[in-house]
Image: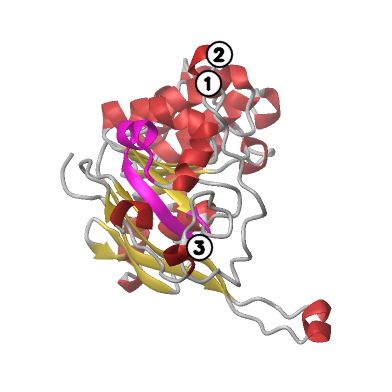
Amino acid sequence: MGDPVLRLDEVSVTFARPRSIVDVIARRPLSDVRAVDEVSLELRPGEVLAVVGESGCGKTTTANVIMGLLSPSAGRVLVRGENVATLNGGELRRSRRKMQMVFQDPYESLNPRMTVGQIVAEPLQVHKVATGIELTARVATALQRAGLRPPERYLNVRPNELSGGQRQRVVIASALSLEPDVLVADEPVSMLDVSIRADILNLLASLARDQGIAVVMITHDMSTVAAYSDRIAVMYLGRIVETGPTLSVLTTPSHPYTRALLSVVPVPHPTQRKPRIILTGETPDPGRIPAGCRFNPRCPEVFDRCRVDDPRLMPTGAAGHEAACWLVGG
C-alpha cells in the first residue's frame, strides 16, 4: 500500500482535572487524566483502520489529535513524514486540507441555514482552492462520490429536507471536496437507522478501495469492523491493547479484553454462539490507572504478574498481530 500517510508516534494526551468539593473533603490527591497513553499507529493509502473499544477508552480523543483539534501532550503526529506540530502558516493549512473528519451526529454537523451546495463549497472557499466554474464542478463531483446523484437535485436543498443517511452523505461530500489523503470517521453510523448503516459503511470502504483514501473508523461496535476494515486497533483505558489484521484479530484474539468484546457480538445461528464473557466492575478512573496491566482489575484471567508489571504490545505469532498481555509474551 506504500509508505504511511499518517503515523502516530507514542502520542499521549493528558488533561488537568479540576478539584471538586468531594476531593477537598476527602483530602484526595489528584492526578492528571491520561485520556490517551503512548499510542502508536500507522495508516497507509487505501487502508481502513478500525479503532474499537468501550466508551471513554480514548478513541475520540485519538481522532481529535489526528485532526489537530487537540495537541498531544507527548509524542508526534506525522503526516507524510512531516511533524504537524512543527508546521505553521501555509504549510499547516496545506497539511490540514489532507485530513478531513466525519463527525458522529449528522444532525448537528450541518448548518441548517445553508444549502447543500453551500455546505460542500465552504471548505473549498475557506482554503481558497477553487472559485467559479471549478468550484461548481468540484462540488458536483464531491456529491457524486458521496452517493448523492444527480448532484443538481441536492444543490439548493437544506439539511432539514434530508434524511439522516443523506445528511451523513453531505458531511462526507464536504470532506471529499478537498480531496483528502486521510478521512477520520468518528462513529459515522451510530446516529443512523440500521437500514442505512451498511450503505454509509460501504461508501467509506469504497472510498478507500477505489480512491486510495486512508480511513480511520472510530467505533465501539465490533460487529461492523469485520466487513469494512483491513486492520483493527483495540483500545482500553487510553492505550492500544491489541492490534493486527482484521481477520487475525477476530479469529484468534489474544487479549482477554478483545475476547470479551467479541463474545457479546450477536451471532444469528444458535449453534455458532459461544459463552459470553461478562466483565465485572467499571472501567477504572483514567486519573488513577491501576498498577501493572491496566485491565487487571476486570480481567478474568489475571495472575500475579499482571498486578505488578505493565505489558507492552508483543508479537502473538501471526504476522502484524500484537497484544499487550503477559499471556502472550510472559
Residue at (60%, 72%) from the top-left corner? 288
Q: Which residue is mark 1?
A: 273
| Disc 3 residue type (three-letter) | Arg
Is 114 on the left or on the right of 102, as rendered?
right
Q: Which residue is mark 2?
A: 270
Are circles 1 and 2 on residues that touch, CB within 8 Å? yes
Q: Identify residue for label 3.
A: 294
Location of residue 207 with respect to 90 vertically, above or below:
above
Whole-angstrom CA distance, mark 1 to mark 2, is 5 Å
Q: Which mark is residue 301?
A: none
From which residue to which does the magenta span run? 236-254
Amino acid type assigned to the residue bearing label 1 in the image: Arg
Report the side of 18 relative to 213 (left or right). Answer: right
Q: Percent x, y for residue 21?
A: 83, 80
Does label 2 or label 3 sit earlier along the sequence?
Answer: 2
SS category of the residue bearing label 3: loop
Residue 248 among magenta residues:
yes
Q: Nearer the viewer, mark 1 or mark 3?
A: 1
228 left or right of 110 in image: left
Tell me if residue 253 comes above or below residue 12 in the rendering: above
From what the image shows, is residue 266 above or below residue 315? above
